[in-house]
């Protein structure tokens, strides 16, 4: 893996991709307490792909999506966990299997090891992790959303 670079070393080339509200995507479960649920269309597509890669009976639960401040300021990240179809906790599997991590990584998202629930695509953290010098998504405010 490429050593992490300083955030300023990754340029942002905003692609202008719109936001979508995850509450409107039936393939995903969104926690009723989720205050922010806007993400870029490309992120939403990858979350739906990840859902299809999870074992039967396991659902991706969005705890929080994009918002105009903090770690989710670009609409490129979501805080996630897995649950049962009815929203219950999923017991850890023997041998340390991580179906959530495997599905999200296969869908192209990257994880912040300091915050295992935080996954992103297209932002500076994603670009650094992938060894790419350009992020796709800049701050949501650049799209005129506050």
Image: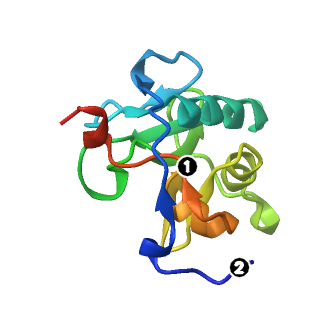
Q: Residue at x 67, y 58 (%)?
A: 92
Picture disc at residue 27 = none
Counting every numbered tag in the picture gives: 2
Q: Residues within 10 Å of mark 1 (few under 14, many from 20)?
A: many
Q: Residue at x 39, y 49 (%)?
A: 138
Among the two numbered marks 1 and 2 on one chain, the one whose residue lies closer to the N terminus: 2
- Numbered disc 2: secondary structure: loop
Q: Is residue 58 visible?
A: no
**Circle 2 residue:** 2
- The quarter holding residue 38 reads top left
Q: Is residue 41 above or below residue 118?
A: above
Q: Residues within 10 Å of mark 2 (few under 14, many from 20)?
A: few
Q: Is residue 85 above or below residue 122?
A: above
- Numbered disc 1: secondary structure: loop
Q: Residue at x 59, y 69 (%)?
A: 128
Q: Which part of the image, by quadrant, shows the C terminus?
A: top left
Q: Residue at x 58, y 33 (%)?
A: 42
Q: Position of residue 40 (x, y in %)?
A: 47, 34
**Circle 1 residue:** 122
Q: Position of residue 88 (x, y in %)?
A: 51, 38
Which residue is most to the left? Answer: 146
- The quarter holding residue 31 reads top left
Decide which of 57, 73 is in the foreground and name it.
73
Q: Which part of the image, by quadrant, shows the N terminus?
A: bottom right
Q: Taking 53 as reference, is 114 left or right? A: left
Q: Is residue 124 visible?
A: yes
- The quarter holding residue 95 reads bottom right
């Amino acid at each position: 893996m490429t050593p992490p670079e300083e955030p300023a070393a990754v340029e942002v080339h905003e692609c202008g991709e719109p936001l979508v509200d995850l509450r409107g995507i039936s393939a995903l479960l969104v926690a009723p307490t989720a205050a922010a649920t806007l993400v870029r269309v490309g992120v939403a597509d990858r979350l739906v792909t990840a859902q299809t890669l999870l074992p039967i009976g396991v659902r991706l639960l969005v705890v929080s999506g994009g918002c105009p401040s903090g770690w989710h300021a670009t609409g490129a990240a979501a805080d996630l966990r897995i649950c049962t179809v009815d929203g219950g906790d999923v017991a850890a599997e023997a041998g340390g299997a991580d179906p959530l991590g495997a599905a999200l990584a296969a869908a192209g998202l990257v994880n912040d090891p300091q915050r295992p629930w935080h996954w992103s695509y297209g932002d500076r953290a994603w670009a650094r992790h992938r060894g790419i010098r350009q992020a796709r998504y800049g701050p949501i405010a650049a799209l005129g959303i506050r």
